[in-house]
């Protein structure tokens, strides 16, 4: 299996990256099941990149149906060290307008019962998640956005809701009272699992419209949403291309050592099947 160091996850409206050349399609089978789709591996700005459509090509999968563990594990098996994730979101603040891109550095989880860890079944681990986004990769993406001229806001809190229905007005106003910035349905689990997999992770939160709290919400048409999705997709690809072009070869963050002090279980009592399942993720710590 070809090894690549850079991964891209495309969300609503971003189901492929046409700029990828020398492309091949790779199906990855993981100990956690099948990812959302096959990976498209190609060359982007002289770097090999693995692209995954989060919801599958054709947008077949609801947020709650996503096998987040298989998606992130497959990136790890491909050798990926950095993931650039794009995701459509609603704005919870007047100043974050449609077509803006937010680079959140915090999350609040409002999902219900989603699996957000690779561990358990005989191996306990507790990662540090106080700062869920890789600061170095966030710097790289922010600089790239400035260079390509896309309005981007660095920092903010992404509220991850269950879906698939959107918020009620009461919920939307509650989240605003908490100081949340954007709302989406997918990125919290990706960020947690990427940290456990010792992969740097950053989210490009692409504002499609205001959430239901806003007085203009009911007047937004499907045509406007689709137009915003398309423009957001073009902007995200431009930022990703510039980021990939400028990425240094080696990492200077702590993401690659996230499990160093996280595994609690006595190694001698870890069940053999659990050890086997987690070998690709934590093998260097299991002895």
Image (tube, grey):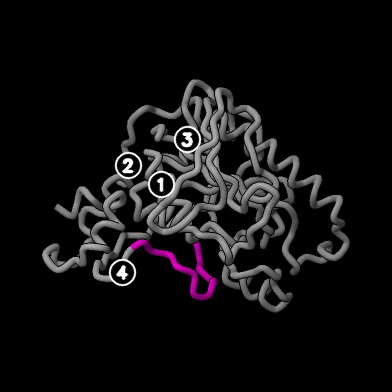
Element on which disc 4 rests: loop
- Real-space Cα separation, disc 3 to disc 2, in angstroms: 12 Å
Which of the 4 quarters of the picture holds residue 17? Answer: top right
- Real-space Cα separation, disc 1 to disc 4, in angstroms: 25 Å
Residue wearing tag 2: 253
Please tell me whether mark 4 or mark 3 is closer to you in this view: 4
Q: Which residues are magenta?
A: 107-118
Q: Earlier in the sequence, mark 1 or mark 4?
A: 4
Q: Residues within 10 Å of mark 4 (few under 14, many from 20)?
A: few
In the displayed structure image, the side of residue 199 where residue 83 appears, left or right: right
Which of the 4 quarters of the picture holds residue 63? Answer: bottom right
Residue 134 is labelled as: 1
In the displayed structure image, the side of residue 70 where residue 103 appears, left or right: right
Residue wearing tag 4: 120
Percent from the top left, x then y, of residue 62?
64, 62
Say if 109 sits above or below 89 in the image.
below
Q: Between residue 154 and residue 196, name the one nearer to us.
A: 196
Q: Residues within 10 Å of mark 3 (few under 14, many from 20)?
A: some
Q: Is residue 153 visible?
A: no
Q: Is residue 171 visible?
A: yes
Q: Quadrant of the N terminus?
A: top left
Q: Residues within 10 Å of mark 1 (few under 14, many from 20)?
A: many
- Real-space Cα separation, disc 1 to disc 2, in angstroms: 7 Å
Residue 177 is labelled as: none
């Amino acid at each position: 299996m070809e090894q690549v160091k850079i991964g891209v996850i495309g969300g609503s409206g971003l189901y492929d990256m046409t700029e990828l050349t020398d492309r091949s399609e790779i199906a990855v089978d993981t100990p956690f099941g099948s990812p959302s789709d096959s990976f498209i591996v190609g060359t982007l700005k002289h770097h090999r990149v693995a692209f995954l459509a989060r919801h599958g090509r054709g947008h077949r999968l609801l947020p709650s149906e996503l096998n987040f563990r298989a998606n992130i594990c497959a990136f790890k098996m491909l050798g990926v060290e950095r993931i650039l994730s794009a995701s459509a979101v609603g704005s919870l603040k007047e100043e974050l307008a449609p077509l803006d891109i937010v680079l959140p550095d915090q999350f609040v989880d409002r999902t219900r019962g989603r699996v957000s860890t690779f561990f358990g079944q005989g191996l306990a681990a507790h990662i540090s998640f106080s700062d869920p986004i890789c600061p170095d990769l966030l710097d790289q993406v922010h600089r790239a956005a400035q260079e390509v001229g896309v309005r981007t806001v660095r920092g903010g809190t992404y509220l991850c809701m269950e879906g698939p229905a959107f918020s009620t007005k009461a919920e939307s106003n509650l989240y605003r009272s908490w100081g949340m910035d954007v709302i989406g349905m997918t990125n919290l689990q990706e960020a947690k699992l990427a940290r456990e997999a010792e992969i740097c992770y950053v989210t490009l939160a692409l504002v499609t419209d205001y959430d239901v709290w806003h007085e203009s919400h009911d007047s937004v048409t499907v045509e406007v949403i689709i137009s915003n999705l398309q423009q957001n997709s073009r902007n995200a690809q431009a930022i990703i291309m510039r980021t990939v072009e400028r990425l240094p070869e080696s990492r200077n963050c702590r993401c690659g050592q996230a499990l160093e002090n996280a595994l609690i279980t006595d190694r001698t009592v870890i069940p053999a099947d659990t050890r086997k399942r987690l070998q690709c993720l934590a093998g260097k710590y299991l002895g």
